[in-house]
Amino acid sequence: MNLYDVSIAPLVRNLQNLKHILQQGELYAEQKKVEPEVILNSRLSIDMYPLTRQVQLVSDMSKGAGARLAGLEIPQYADDETSFEMLYARIDKTIDFLSQIQPAQLEGAESKEVVLTIRKIDLTFTGLDYLQKWAMPNVYFHITTAYNILRHIGVPLGKTDYLGQKR
Amino acid sequence: MNLYDVSIAPLVRNLQNLKHILQQGELYAEQKKVEPEVILNSRLSIDMYPLTRQVQLVSDMSKGAGARLAGLEIPQYADDETSFEMLYARIDKTIDFLSQIQPAQLEGAESKEVVLTIRKIDLTFTGLDYLQKWAMPNVYFHITTAYNILRHIGVPLGKTDYLGQKR
């Protein structure tokens, strides 16, 4: 077992599953003859982020984790997605970025220092703690919330859509 | 890095965070003068599980993962919780079970065979795949859904409640 197996591999798989879930949302909009924006702007509570932002955050958390652990610069995306197509492209380029990372680039990353600055406060982690206490919980949070937003508005989805076909 | 760091440690932390989140829900019921059952029976969609079942499933996935990876018998609980107090007790006994597992008991578990029978179909995993493709995604799914149910009905919660104070 190495760090790659518990970081890059699940991050890529989660992004693929998220794209699949969103595709079911897009299909639902077509079937219901509603504007895609209605779905993209849906949220579970007025002070929670809408679907589009949930997807952007999965991307941010994923590329941040890959880049920090592999010692690469974090790709900057414009957060300007306004359609399903644009969200798919965002997911795809995040997957492309992660897919270029090789297991050897993560060697020893579990014990390197990672510092996040959140609202002007520095949070210092080991690489492993950053992954386990920050990156993965956040990724799963925003994917599950995207799924829950879609389920809440009636999109037919099941646990298998979230877990992915290839178990 | 060993398997314990990416299994038992995050499972225990997630259960502690879940208990904290539920306590905010119980407090909210008191403040709003509603029966706790109203909150415990809340769900995001008529064909999704209510809050109580989400908590039971976090417990099931957590004790299942700990037991299977450590080669122990899976503790059986009755799924008869009808109050916040009973759910806290369920979480506490799940934490107690996991806390007795030592890192040495997981040695080599990443490559052992784990077979799950889901709706009469056998799913065969390595220990690592079982953890990464089944147990952890399910645990995060049901904790986030518990959080989302509470947020949806108005309980004041933030990401820190979900991530836990000690990052």
Image: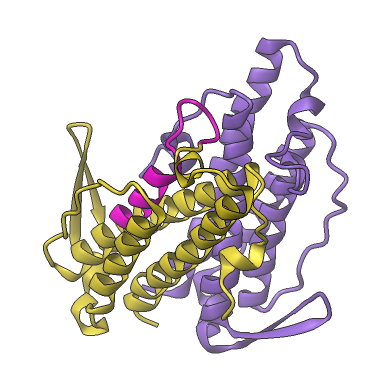
Chain colours: A yellow, B purple
Task: Provide residue B83's location: percent of width, then percent of height.
Answer: 80, 32
Residue in view at x 57 percent, y 34 percent = B20
A88 is higher (above) or lower (below) than B69: above
Instruction: Pick whichever, B37 or A133, lies toward us.
Output: B37
Q: Is B54 positioned to the left or the right of A34 in the image?
A: right
Position in image of residue B113 (x %, y %)? 63, 89
B122 horizontally vs B5: left or right? right
Residue drawn at the location 62% of the way across and 32% of the way down: B150
Residue B111 in the magenta stretch? The answer is no
Residue A129 seen in the current view: no
Question: In this rendering, would B17 be left or right of B82?
Answer: left
Bounds of the magenta span?
A43-61
Looking at the picture, tell me which residue is in the foreground, A135 or A24: A24
Residue A162 place in picture, x, y as percent: 57, 63
Question: In the rendered view, would you say A161 is above or below B121?
Answer: above
Residue A92 falls in image quadrant: bottom left
Q: Residue visible at 21% across and 84% down?
A: A104
